[in-house]
Image (cartoon, rainbow, N blue to C red):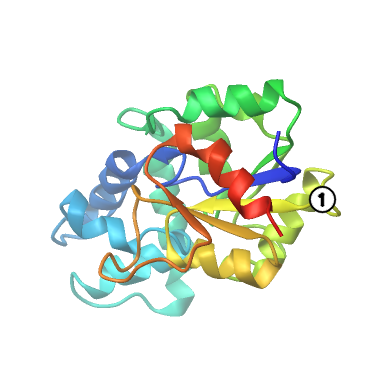
Amino acid sequence: MSAIEAVVFDLDGTLIDSVPDVAAAVNRLLAEDGRRTFAIKELKPMIGRGAGDMLEKAFRLTGAPLEESGIPAAVARYLEHYLRHPAEGTVVFPGGREILARFAADGLPLGICTNKPRAATASVLKALGLEAFFRGVSCDDAPARKPDGRHVRHTLELMGAADRKAALVGDSEIDMAAARDAGVAAIAVSWGYPNDASKPLDADVTIDRFSDLPAALETVARP
């Protein structure tokens, strides 16, 4: 095992491909308000900063924007739709389940750091049978949210790994910025939902498949 002593994962776009169910819930909400709906490829770049930010962008692109005071109600309506169907089209990215099982068997502390709402995160982790792998799960109810590095540090605290050498694995510049701010290694995945696909991510290492992650951890652990 590498000198990295704890690994924190982003969720959507990194461990799981959740955009089919996220898009379905967003589109049901928009349709209720008589707005146009989004193709999956349109919605992907909106994911990453939390449901409120995603819905604010979706409403702005489809008509009258959401007032700030209306965001909590919109998020609540979105979650009603999402929680009815949290994992109909959502899957773990290839190799993800296997690498989690390998790390867990080795005793490596694992965590989730996501801007996704708590209820949605718990629902999808349970539906996919992933919840037992993680010692700590930090969501949109954390004291700070990515790209703030305090979100990552909070996750490590929940994992009982606050003083351990750690790495964050993610798919977007939000994740990489959070890793830098937290002072942990930044590992990017080449799949997922980057916020701007035209810009390379500021990562220490980028992997193309989960089977490359152990070697990446060895690389970032070197002085």
> Measuring 41% from the left and 34% from the top, which residue is drawn there?
86
Spot occupied by residue 155 in the image (x, y as percentages of width and height): 72, 52
Give the camera-side residue of 56 and 94.
94
* Left or right, residue 179 beside residue 75: right
| Among the 4 quarters of the image, the one containing residue 80 | top left
* Left or right, residue 36 beside residue 101: left
> Measuring 27% from the left and 69% from the top, which residue is drawn there?
59
Q: Is residue 2 visible?
A: yes
Q: Is mark 1 on a helix, strand or loop?
A: loop
Q: Can residue 112 be seen in this view?
A: no
Quarter placement of the C terminus: bottom right
Q: In this view, does 136 lie above or below 43?
A: above
Give the camera-side residue of 130 and 207.
207
> Looking at the picture, which amino acid does disc 1 mark?
Arg
Give the camera-side residue of 122 and 36.
122
Q: In this view, does 2 lie above or below 103?
A: below
> Measuring 35% from the left and 67% from the top, which residue is drawn there?
200
Could you classify mark 1 by the number of other residues whose Cα lies within 10 Å: few (under 14), some (14-19), or many (20 or more)? some
Spot occupied by residue 199 in the image (x, y as percentages of width and height): 31, 71
On the image, numbered disc 1 is attached to which residue? 164
Spot occupied by residue 54 in the image (x, y as percentages of width and height): 37, 63
